[in-house]
Image: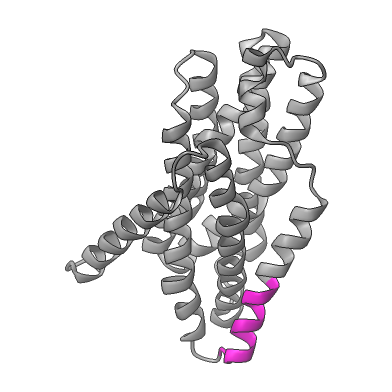
Amino acid sequence: MSVPLILTLLAGGATFVGALLAIIGQKPSNRVLAFALGFAAGIMLLISLMEMLPAALDTQGMSPMLGYGMFIIGLVGYFMLDRMLPHQHAHDLMDAPKAGKTRNLRRTAMLLTLGISLHNFPEGIATFVTASSDLELGMGIALAVAIHNIPEGLAVAGPVYAATGSKTKALWWASVSGFAEILGGLLAFFLLGPAISPVLMASIMAMVAGIMVALSVDELMPLAKEIDPQNNPSYGVLCGMTVMGFSLTLLQSSPLG
């Protein structure tokens, strides 16, 4: 099994970790969840704009028009897909049992599972493609995806557990949303293969960078603010950028870099 595929499996599996936290009653505070989402957004933004897009543009045979065009396609494509997906507010779902809002909770949780699954699918492709092109960047993307998958696992398993009283069903539906990410990685693994041309890989990387930027700005940062309105999600974003920047600097300056 290839290392990029393993990274994709681990990133998708983080959803299951969040589900476990939901059913054992150890749900992190909203402040911690919001910081984690901001932290993941910071990692994605820095890697996408400072590493992935420049690397794609520097690829031999890649024209700036094609590179930036693919980046814009990733941005616009994400927003078009996002507008078509069912939207539920994760923190409202997690707090619903406390507020006595159990009516239609199961249906709402299923819609959330569908929405998160469809969001996770391109993330799996992004993790695999990035790691295939540059393992260091792939590790960073996998880390960011794994971090924000934990709150997603909480958001799915919590309401399912509240609605059904079944820990098994809660874990199952959370795992479904995480498997969508793994499915995206597997699809990329079988379709792309080892013989993909450098220009095509660079084009996909540029598009993935656009998807990651859109995901960070449109989904992770607003959700972090929604979960914890009292604190600024920018702190998590800046911390994520700082940590990822330092780690990339150390990796690139090391004898193995």
Residue 5 horizontal/vertical position (percent): 51, 50
Q: Residue furthest top?
A: 165
Task: Specify the segment rendered in magenta.
Answer: 62-73
Residue 36 included in the magenta stretch of the image:
no
Is 248 situated left or right of 40 in this image? left
> Can residue 189 be seen at all in this image of the molecule?
no
Q: Residue at the far left: name it.
A: 255
**Residue appearing at x 58%, y 82% in the figure:** 199
Question: Where is residue 34 drawn, in percent x and y?
Answer: 47, 40
Measuring 31% from the left and 59% from the top, which residue is drawn there? Answer: 242
Q: Quadrant of the C terminus?
A: bottom left
The image quadrant that residue 163 belongs to is top right
Question: Count of labels shown?
Answer: 0
| Percent position of residue 138, x then y | 44, 59
Rendered image coloring scheme: one colour
Dominant secondary structure of the residues highlighted in magenta in the image: helix
At x 73%, y 26%, the residue is 109
**Residue 229 sits above or below residue 95 on the image:** below
253 is higher (above) or lower (below) than 88: below
Task: Name the residue: 62% across, 75% down.
Answer: 71
Residue 227 drawn above or below residue 243:
above
Q: Is residue 236 left or right of residue 173?
A: left
Q: Is residue 229 visible?
A: yes
Q: Position of residue 147 (x, y in %)?
A: 45, 42
Of residues 87 and 129, the one nearer the viewer is 87
